[in-house]
Image: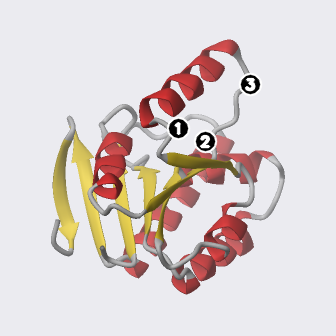
Amino acid sequence: MPHLTVILGGAASGKSAFAEALICETGRRRIYIATAQAFDAEMEDKIARHKAARGADWRTVEAPLDPSTTIADAAPDEILLLDCATLWLSNTMLADRPWQPEADRLLDALSACKAPVVVVSNETGMGIVPDHPLGRAFRNAQGSLNQRLAAQADRVALIVAGLPLPLKGAF
């Protein structure tokens, strides 16, 4: 398993399912780093369904603002899934934290991690230009973060309609 794999795609494209399948193939102890926060009943239900679907073979760590600590603490025989960088970035920006230093910290943790990591992230730059300044700032920040993740990654895939399109490295 490569050190860092990045899985990109649109909303509901199948990127998380693809990432989970990659991880399950390794036989390593699995850690799911969850960045989603349940602010309403719909999201609570979605999180519960996804957690149940993963099953008991995953240890889930909720880290909406600080996935770097879990990444830094990983053992060499584990494998991590950060799902997802998009929600982490959104959480960071909405908490009025400067995202660039936080992204530096995340990328440093990924680089130093002793275990393989798979990062799921949304490709947000293929839609319409957001009409609100915060939306445009988020879209630009997400594009920058995805570029930095992809540059550091050993392999990158874009998921469209559940199908992987390899962009970097072999799958």
For the N terminus, the quadrant is bottom left
CB-based contact (under 8 Å), mark 2 and mark 1? yes
Residue 61 place in picture, x, y as percent: 66, 50
Q: In which quarter of the image is residue 37?
A: top right
Q: How far apart are marks 3 and 1 (CA)?
A: 23 Å
Disc 3 to disc 2, C-alpha distance: 19 Å
Instruction: Report the residue that reaches farthest toward the top.
Output: 41
Disc 3: which residue: 39
Which of the two labelled residues, at mark 2 and mark 1, occupies the earlier sequence position? 1
Q: Which mark is residue 130?
A: 1
User: What amino acid type should be assigned to the residue bearing mark 2?
Assistant: Gly
- State yes or no: discs 3 and 2 in contact (Cβ < 8 Å): no
Q: In which quarter of the image is residue 12?
A: top left
Q: Residue at x 29, y 66 (%)?
A: 156
Of tags 3 and 2, the one toward the viewer is 3
Q: What element carries label 2?
A: helix
First in sequence, mark 3 or 2: give its number: 3
Instruction: Tell me, for residue 135, which label it has, or none.
Output: 2
Total number of numbered discs in the rendering? 3
User: Is residue 4 visible to us here?
Assistant: yes
Q: Residue 93, image x and y in percent? A: 73, 52
